[in-house]
Amino acid sequence: MPKHKNLIVSAEVVTAGRKRKCYHASSHIITKGDPCLEVKDGMALKGYCAECADVMIRNALDFLEKLRVGLENSSRGNAS
């Protein structure tokens, strides 16, 4: 049986190795040693500060929950 498809893009929490700007909000500075979220976009890695990453993760959780509820509602509708 094939593996299930992962809905989450390649992302991980890393410790910044150098000072850089957040990809979402360039006014947010990620200082060397700060935790940040790195998301693979094609061949590039984009870094997001903890504040922006938190919003992104919450939005993703909300979206996944809506997908789950939609499937449950569809299953109940088809069972009748």
Image (cartoon, rainbow, N blue to C red):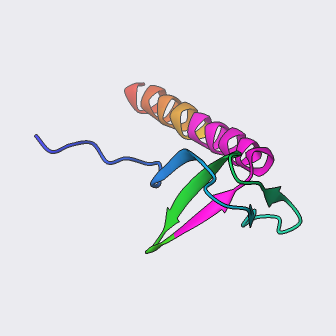
- Side of 14 where 71 appears, left or right: left
At x 47%, y 48%, the residue is 8
- Front residue of 10/61: it is 10
Quarter of the image where the C terminus is located: top left
Quarter of the image where the N terminus is located: top left
Say if 3 sits above or below 47 in the image.
above
- Front residue of 71/61: it is 61
Residue 10: quarter of image? bottom left
- Side of 68 where 4 appears, left or right: left
What secondary structure characterizes most of the magenta part? helix
Please say whether residue 11 is one of the residues in the magenta stretch.
no
Say if 75 sits above or below 46 in the image.
above
- Side of 19 where 1 appears, left or right: left
At x 89%, y 66%, the residue is 27
At x 71%, y 45%, the residue is 34
Point out the stretch of residues depicted in magenta: 45-65
Give the x, y percent position of residue 72: 49, 29
Please say whether residue 55 is one of the residues in the magenta stretch.
yes
- Outermost residue, bottom side: 43
